[in-house]
Image (spheres, rainbow, N blue to C red):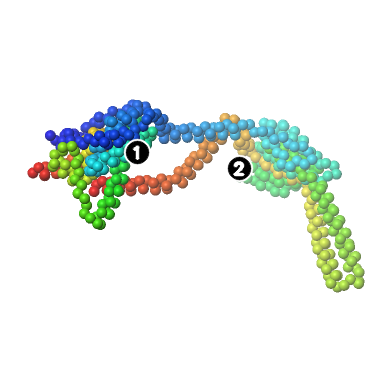
Amino acid sequence: MSTVDLLRAHAPSAPDALRERVLAARPTERVRVLRVRPVVVLAGAAALAIAAAFVHGFTTSAPAPVVVEKAPSVLRGAAATTTADSTAKLQTRVAAVPAQAAGRLQHTDASITVRVDDVGAMTNRATQIASSLGGYAQSVRYRSRGASYIELRIPAQHVKEALVRLAALGVLVSQQISIDDLTATLQRQSDQIAQLRRRIAALNAALRDTSLPESQRVLLQIKLAESKRALAQRVHGRKETIAAGQTARVSLVLTTRKQAAAVPHHRGRLDRMLHSALGFLAVEGMVVLFALIVISPFVLAGALVWWFRRRAVDRLLME
Amino acid sequence: MDVNAASSTVRLPRAGDRPSFDDVVAEQLDSVYRYLVYLTGDRAAAEDLAAETFEKAFRSWRRFDPRRAAPRTWLCSIARSVAVDWFRAETRRRRREETYARDVDTTAEFGDGLPGPLEAALRELAPAEREVIALRILLELDGPSAARVLGISHTACSTRLSRALKRLEEMTNDVDR
């Protein structure tokens, strides 16, 4: 009989007492367990992430609401951006720029983007338009890829005409117009100037009094000097306010057809949805990558602990 | 005899085929007990550890998945974990007692009526060697299952079994002479 057969033939059997002891702790009912495998969890998480990305893409790709320009007297930040196909509509809007209100001082600030074929020629044409209307080009900047940025100063009474003519240089892509009413500011500055003049007159009258003690005289002289300085500042400010009301600032951007075509609103709904979903997926990927980077040291430490414990068990059982 | 070719007699359940705990106890108690006797070399300790193993198994019975492992493999894994804790406690106890007194002579009895030379040879083997003999020969686990219980590769498991049997036979022959 071989060793293996002997070992099998004389294998020890569990005593009855042990069997009874173990059976005393048996369960009372059968258990049906649904075990969720990690791969199923991972697949579910991936499907959820993709679904979330597409839902995000779908909701964010809805057509952009049309911004309606607010009406007249104070237009602040009222903007309209649309596709090149609605040029006629924009031309109408440019034509609808409110005229200067009679008896009021207003500053107009406009920025328009026009798509042209020849940026250089149209830049010259824009400065000519400004000059012909009594204005000037404050700055002109060319960018390497067929775009130029022009800052124009146009007399307030001609700003409407200037915008119409500048828009006619090509296809109007976008416009933004804001009008600030400076009348109240001007009135306040005028009141302050009048008040300071009265004060200076009063101080001069007081200083003409020969019986005034020397200490009082010095004090009044100091106050007079301060009032004159304040008056000079107010007068300067009032001039600036008037100047701002008399000239409008027009920021003109001239771009080529290729650049204007890159405006994101030209994308279709499906394209925008896919683009947005991919962006969202990229963000999700970055979050997962960040989480992996954060937990990887702990995983490594855990693996080392597991390995050392296993080595210790091997040594223990080999003694 | 080609030990590696020995196939497990444990019936692998089909998906969703979950035995009752009573059946598992009835079928596997002897196997777990034998494994623990060989591993610890102490019958009294093996009884306690077997009881503890089934207690643990009962507590984690809900998590047992018959599609992933046979009940015998699963129980042996639990038994090994319980036995390792016992070995650690024993090592600490022996270290303490070595300071004050000589070690108590605990003569192990591995088999029921096993010939003396074979008993003596088994006693000389390391627990890890007896363990692999128990798993592969007494419990007749297949190579991958035994390797899984031991936490080593299939090749390492075969090598360990081969060396253990060789040593066992060498020692038995020495005693016989």
Give the quarter of the image for residue A125.
top right
Left or right: where A291 falls relative to A5: right
Task: Classify mark 1: helix, strand or loop.
Answer: helix
Left or right: where A318 falls relative to A144: left
Give the quarter of the image for residue A43.
top left
Residue A211 is situated, as x and y percent measured from the top left of the image, at 91, 72
Q: Vertically, is B42 above or below B62?
A: below
Label 1 amino acid? Lys
Give the quarter of the image for residue A144.
top right
Residue where numbered disc 2 is placed: A145
Q: Nearer the viewer, mark 1 or mark 2?
A: 1
Q: Vertically, is A211 above or below B137?
A: below
> To which chain does the residue with label 1 belong?
B
Q: Quadrant of the N terminus of chain B?
A: top left
Residue B29 is situated, as x and y percent measured from the top left of the image, at 27, 34
- The lab-note entry on whether marks 1 and 2 share a chain reads no
Label 2 amino acid? Arg
Left or right: where A191 falls relative to A17: right
10 Å crowding of disc 1: few (<14), some (14-19), many (20+): some
